[in-house]
Amino acid sequence: RIVAVGSINMDLVNHVAEFPLPGETIHGRGTEYLPGGKGANQAVAASLAGGNVAMIGAVGEDSFAEPLLASLRDRGVDVSGVLRKPGTSGLAFITVSDAGENQIILSEGSNGRLRPEDLPAEKLAEADAVILQNEIPWETNLRAMEICRTGRAKVVYNPAPVKPIPQEAYPLIDLLVVNETEAEGLSGVPVDGLEGAEKAAKELLGRGAGSVLVTLGAQGSYYLGPDGGGIRTPAFPVRPVDTTAAGDTFIGALVTAEAGGMKTADALRFASAASAIAVTRKGAQASIPTRDEIERMVAP
Ligand code: ADP
């Protein structure tokens, strides 16, 4: 069983010709409600890849709470551990211009109110893997890591959006998953492609992480294992439409594949296929593929 602890957001996407200037009012071209949030996206990705997945998080007491839960439930995620907290749910106000640029205001809402004492210790400790990101309070993530240490659960941590990790927390992480920006921000090593990724991964492994995965967008990914052995996995060649949730899809699919006993190199290829499909579709959770779709991509 896999447990995702993290954020649950509604992405409110407005399309405009051009961004409004300060003080200006403009007409939009329409609004979409797209369930997202890194925690929820990774839970959905793990579930659709065939995993038995439970979500731990919080929604608010507002009209977004129910559709957010439904999006998870419809994709097979157990939401019995999702709390309801007074106030709003996590919201992302996204404006996309005709030029393809975006502006985003994050309102953490109930995600910011998920406390260490809200965590169900037994459920975490007994999981095969617990997946964490940076859209809930750090104290809650740290507590989750400490609980995993008391049990058998492997800690998979995706520090996004990036902020420094206290040195004493590195040894609590079994798999640290970072994109180029996060790899560079944490390691201090410039990362623009495979060479930098290898150096950054080595630095982060040196700080005590059990293993490190650096995702490199269309350039694929680099994994550095506990024994110091590296695996380069190419990206599948696709025409990207919307890269939202590419990293989240990779992580969820990887964790499910590994929990199912797949060898690391095969699990990385499976995850690469899953995220390649996700970038060819719009939205966050709506873009995440099923196990059948992933298997057809891996071995057509
Ligand atoms: P994030 O979304 O967290 O920034 P990346 O952009 O590194 O993460 O993407 C994660 C993974 O998704 C990559 O390692 C790759 O396997 C896949 N991916 C991302 N962009 C593309 C693309 N344009 N074509 C194919 N695969 C992609």
Image (spheres, grey):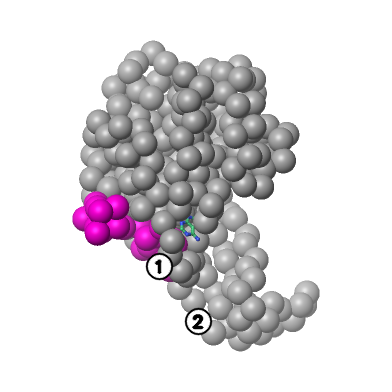
Determine contact: label 1, label 2, CB under 8 Å: no
Between 85 and 111, which is closer to the camera in this rendering? Answer: 111
Dot 1: element: loop
Q: Amino acid at mark 2?
A: Gly
Measure the C-alpha gap from mark 1 to mark 2: 19 Å
Tell me: residue 68, above or below residue 127: below
Indicate yes or no whether the magenta region holds residue 291.
Answer: yes
Q: Quadrant of residue 165?
A: top right
Indicate yes or no whether the magenta region holds residue 168.
Answer: no
> Residue 138's spot in the image, x, y percent?
57, 32
Residue drawn at 46 percent across, 49 percent down: 234
Residue 145 visible from this viewpoint = no
Residue drawn at 68 percent across, 32 percent down: 187
Q: Amino acid at mark 1?
A: Arg
Residue 47 visible from this viewpoint = yes
Between 256 and 134, which is closer to the camera in this rendering? Answer: 256
> Residue 44's spot in the image, x, y percent?
33, 50
**Pointer 2: what residue?**
30
Tell me: residue 114, above or below residue 45: above
Tell me: residue 205, above or below residue 29: above
Q: Which contiguous range is marked in magenta?
A: 276-300
Which class describes the residues within 10 Å of circle 2: few (<14), some (14-19), or many (20+)? Answer: few
**Pointer 1: what residue?**
281
> Residue 58's spot in the image, x, y percent?
42, 43
Dot 2: element: loop
Who comes first in sequence, dot 1 or dot 2? 2
Q: Nearer the viewer, mark 1 or mark 2?
A: 1
> Residue 113's spot in the image, x, y percent?
52, 40
Quarter of the picture containing the N terminus is top left
